[in-house]
Amino acid sequence: MTTIATQPEAILEANLVNQLQGMGYRAVQIRHEADMLANLQAELEEHNKIKLSTKEFLQVLNHLNRGNVFDRAQILRDKMALQREDGTTTYIEFLNVEHWCQNRFQVCTQVTMEGSYTNRYDVTLLINGLPLVQIELKRRGLELKEAFNQTNRNQRHSYWSGYALYNYIQIFVISNGVNTKFYANNRNQSFKQTFFWTDEQNRRISQLQEFTQAFLEPCHISKMICKYVVLHQSDKCLMVLRPYQYYAVEKIIERVKTGTKNGYIWHTTGSGKTLTSFKASQILTKLPMVHKVVFVVDRNDLDYQTTKEFNAFSSGSVDGTNNTQMLVKQLADDTPLIVTTIQKLNTAISKSQYLERLEHLRQQRMVFIFDECHRSQFGETHQRIRKFFEAAQLFGFTGTPIFADNAAKGVEGNRTTKDLFSDCLHKYVITDAIRDENVLRFSVEYIGKYQHNEQSKTRMDIKVEDIDTAGLLEDPRRLEKITDYIIANHNAKTRNREFTAIFAISNVETLIKYYELFRKKKAAGDHDLRIATIFSFTANEDDKDANGFIPDDQDIFADGKGGINKHSRDKLDEFIADYNDMYGTKYSTKDSQSFYNYYKELARRVKNREVDILLVVNMFLTGFDSKHLNTLYVDKNLRFHGLIQAFSRTNRVLNETKSQGNILCFRNLKAATDEAITLFSNKEAIEEVVLPPYENQVARMNQALGRLYQLVPTVQSVDELPDEEAQLQFVQAFREIMRIRNVMESYADFNFEELHISPQAFEDYKSKYLDIYDSVSRGTRKEKVSILEDVDFELELIHRDEINVAYILKLLAKLKGTNAEQQQKLRKQVMDVMAGEITLRSKKELIERFIEEALPLVEDTDDIPQAFISFVDQEKEDAFRKICTEEKLRPEQFREVLGEYLFTQIDPQPDAIINLLEEKPRILERKTILDRVLQRLKDFVETYITGVGE
């Protein structure tokens, strides 16, 4: 009897199909595209109650066979006007999006498609004959990511073949029986954008059988496709709601349909509240009992940003309200969905000149959705809205609700989120999100006393516990030491500026001092960081909520009363002038529109990693999302929701290299951090939310190294591993070490001294790791399918942007004019760097030949880069001719195919490679030759073209 641990895919697949049939899917035998097309015609005819002639069905196929995945998702949801042979017009529906249970559901297995390679797909769910859900299975015990990689290969190799019906897939499901995840058909996403399904209480449903019952039930999967797959217009990609987003929207819809009570959604910061609120708003506008939906934010930047994001999900779905007059117009006309600020809404219902135009709305069923409802809705404005719109229903979204513990004293009687919005309809707290890998954990370091070392010029001798007086906090020596510390450690924290950072500072006066310190040190050549800033407040006291508001336009430049004073404004203009010099812009504070445009562009540049560190007091500490921001420096007191909001700027999920959000506190916020995490999750949550201290990471690494040494005691023993099973164990063991090291590198204390491995030994093991990767990726194991082919080697944990050809050439320049012993040492350094750097391994032999043959002939070290380019050009031509001779290729045609590959980065079609050959291969030889020629083409590009000109 087959055990769970070794249950093969075939049994997993058979059990799944049996379960699906029992749930209402009809099994259908489809082996090739011809079967798929015949079934599609029959299903469309049955769904549309129509009979199609051969010519009419060909029209349908030509209509369906247009565009990319995004285009086809739109075609799927539209009807087709079919010109019939008798001259009449009828409409063909491909998917019933309004009554999703009335679609037709089938299941088929092992469909074979011929593309660049022949692929067979495990289990396909057909809706009205179109393949809309693809399920890829791996046997129990294998990594789930192998199934993810399989779907990526199928997308690359064969989904586009024939009529490309598989590009109609909306949702992928991957499973190894024990773990099951789903995700939208978005070619650019990583494994980090795959999700577990859960129940309403966020309990994970991972077993395939249980997942199938909950998620693949015909009505449910059809509902997910029809209502909860979002077509992101600006990125031209598909997105699917995660389970907690689905439950939140369903709860809001249910409450509106069944009554008039209010409610709020508690979803932790960074979990995608904009997408959730968009779907809720979009669905609510279609309910007959709802007159209008108004999405309310409390800052002008969020008004602009939210309108932009809503329109990105559905182009033209929202008209931005640029001023109160426009808001009143949209409230009075038939605009179904409005995005506005609470300030403009307050003005609209407070000023007598607007009231007459809005009087008719008092008794209308209006639904208001408040974004981040922990903010300024707590006050008179909130009550005024409720008083004016007597039939309104209010819903709030927040990542950090107001409880009795963190309510502002004296504001509306310390009213909580529950007081204002009634019940919490759905909860998804930070521990849920971390467990689901939807947000990252925090690495919080409290920077106090530091000793001088070679890596850092910084020596901070003021402990954080001893600086709680204003005099020490503002001491110029302290500010300079913190500035030096940031300069010394920024590259390590941001992986050589692969990511960006925000520096949160207590007040404007201190921010000015920090900015001027950074500027002075840049002029002195101490750093080349791109520093920018923006601020609008001058209050000296810490802002406990870190609200980050942009005030109304008329208040931005007011002297005193919370605006910026003349001195601060002059300084801000001075700093914006630095920004203008850096980017060739012309912003200033001379008028509010220019300042606001500066704010918007600054936000864009931070997101695009064009600013390294942004200095702020309150702004950008809430409501600003950037996946490429991973570090927050803090010299500011933060508490409760303000702390969680600020920290959460750093914890958006991106890829394998972004393993946590880095928080560097220059004040003792330990108690405040623990208090905030406890308030917004539970007392046991701190270890789940915050990474353990450095000492724990050292112990974890040394344990992992112990497991590695048991398998391969020395670097040389990697070569003696007896089979692929042993190699797989080594790959998995060393990959775990790389993952831990990726986390450790962000700690200020990181070094190899406490680790049971030297830097050189680590690089040597890494080189062996890459040797195994090369043997798989370069097709040296053709006699059988390698068990390593589906393993994710996570090369992004190895790649370092600063190690490239230019870096190597600088090292080579050092060889000139040195003695034999020094040359040998430097040459070994060059070889070690290339062996351990994935982007350079293909060029190792090329650079070795350059060192032997060409470098001795170069007299001036400044001529080395040009000499290298000339050498590579000649070697490239020789290699090109060699490939053509050995593979018997037509040179001119090969150049054309090569140029097309360089331009498109898409593998050439088999026929294109066949046409290169001077002699047509026999059928049995064809695949071997095609694979070999394609691999040689890729190796040629990787060796002689990619990265050579850097």
Image (tube, rainbow, N blue to C red):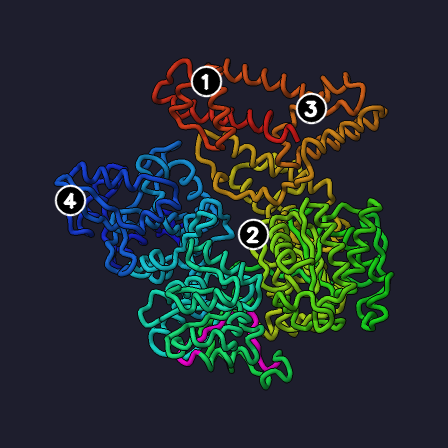
- Residue 402 placement (x, y as % from top left): 57, 77
Distance, label 1 to label 4, CA atoms, is 49 Å
Distance, label 2 to label 4, CA atoms, is 52 Å
Crowding at mark 3 (Cα within 10 Å: few <14, some 14-19, many 20+): some
Which of pointers 2 and 3 indicates the residue nearer the eye? Answer: 2
Distance, label 1 to label 3, CA atoms, is 31 Å
Crowding at mark 1 (Cα within 10 Å: few <14, some 14-19, many 20+): some
Give the magenta part as a residue range.
389-405
Distance, label 3 to label 4, CA atoms, is 73 Å
Q: Which residue ends up furthest to the left in the rendered image?
A: 86
Which of the two residues, 59 or 214, is positioned nearer the viewer here?
Answer: 59
Rendered image: mark on residue 88? 4
Rendered image: mark on residue 848? 3
Q: Identity of the amino acid at label 1?
A: Gln
Marks 3 and 4, the one that precedes in the sequence: 4
Q: Identity of the amino acid at label 2?
A: Leu
Q: Residue at x 58, y 49 (%)?
A: 656
Rendered image: mark on residue 893? 1
Corner quadrant of residue 564:
bottom right
- Residue 914 placement (x, y as % from top left): 39, 21
Marks 1 and 3, the one that precedes in the sequence: 3
- Residue under label 2: 654
Distance, label 2 to label 3, CA atoms, is 37 Å
Q: Is residue 267 visible?
A: no
Which of the two residues, 800 or 54, is positioned nearer the viewer here?
Answer: 54
Marks 2 and 4, the one that precedes in the sequence: 4
Marks 2 and 3, the one that precedes in the sequence: 2
